[in-house]
Amino acid sequence: MKKALLIALTVSLLAPGAMAQDEDGVRFGLKLAPNMSWQRPDTKGIKSDGSKFGYTFGLNVEFPVGANGNYRFGTGLMLNNVGGKLNQEYSYVDTSGTTLTKDLTQDIKLRYIEVPLTMKLLTNEIGYIRYFGLIGFGAAFNIRAKGDYDVPVPDANGSIVGFATLEDEDIKDDVQAFKASLIIGAGMEYNFSGNTALQVGVTYNNGFTNTLADKEVNGKTAKSFQDYLELNLGIFF
């Protein structure tokens, strides 16, 4: 996490100097992006058990870098809804004394406030269209965490008599407050007139900090990373 914060700080310090070359080209825009998200576990005993559909929306800001208009530093403020499903093997003893195993599932629903820091590289205009690729860093802070998960139901002797599913439980204490990620994307911009442009693209957000907090599996700290792929729809003014 310290390394991720250092990268963010470095980009934030270097960006104003580069942007000062052409302040007239600053653009503001709105973004709405449906996404497909999943958890990527990195601990033996936990498996991914499916993806979820979510969405991102918020404000985009882009600053020109250099004089030719083909490079832009981007940031903004996003509300990001993602999640995923995890599966953990659980061993237990039933009322007959038999040792059994069962896969316990957890459906995680997370909400973040995210600040992206990206660099966009654009082609020259072809007709009314410019194509672009972008790469950067995402810093996100968890503001909500809910989960549906299975729990064992013991009898008075500690034997497991069944399982119950808890729904929409608050799991904020089980989730790390900060999430850092790598952002990679590509797309196109269509210019309507003047400064108004429609943006369409695909963005992949690859988490590289652990989503889980204080969770152990088989005596080891459990690790799982939040990834998502989104259809990036935006308009700049």
Image (spheres, helix red, strand yellow):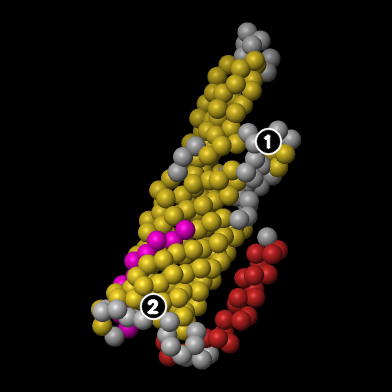
Q: Which is nearer the N-term, disc 2 or disc 1?
A: 2
For this view, does 176 lie left or right of residue 19? right
Q: Secondary structure at mark 2?
A: loop
For this view, does 190 lie left or right of residue 220? left
- Taking the image as drawn, is residue 196 in sight? yes
Where residue 224 appears, as percent x and y from the top left, is 60, 46
Question: Which residue does the numbered mark 1 point to in the structure image?
Answer: 217
Where residue 26 appears, as percent x and y from the top left, is 43, 84
Quadrant that contains the N terminus: bottom right
Q: What amino acid is labelled 2 in the image?
A: Thr
For this view, does 217 lie left or right of residue 122? right
Q: Which mark, by number, is residue 123?
A: 2
Q: Nearer the viewer, residue 154 or 62?
A: 62
Which residue is at a point 66% across and 10% down the rendered structure image? 97
Which residue is at a point 56% across and 23% down the rendered structure image? 102
Which residue is at a point 43% across and 45% down the rendered structure image? 52
Q: Main secondary structure of the magenta part?
A: strand
Q: Which residues are magenta?
A: 195-204
Q: Secondary structure at mark 1?
A: strand
Q: Nearer the viewer, residue 9 or 71?
A: 71
Task: Give the foreground label among 2 and 1.
Answer: 2
| Label 1: how many Cα within 10 Å (few below 14, some 14–19, many 20+) | some
In the figure, 17 relative to 159: above or below? Answer: below
| Label 2: how many Cα within 10 Å (few below 14, some 14–19, many 20+) | some
For this view, does 219 lie left or right of residue 84? right
Where residue 94 appears, as percent x and y from the top left, is 62, 14
Q: What amino acid is labelled 1 in the image?
A: Val
In the figure, 143 relative to 126: above or below? Answer: above
In the figure, 187 relative to 38: above or below? Answer: below
Marks 2 & 1, CB-CB < 8 Å contact: no
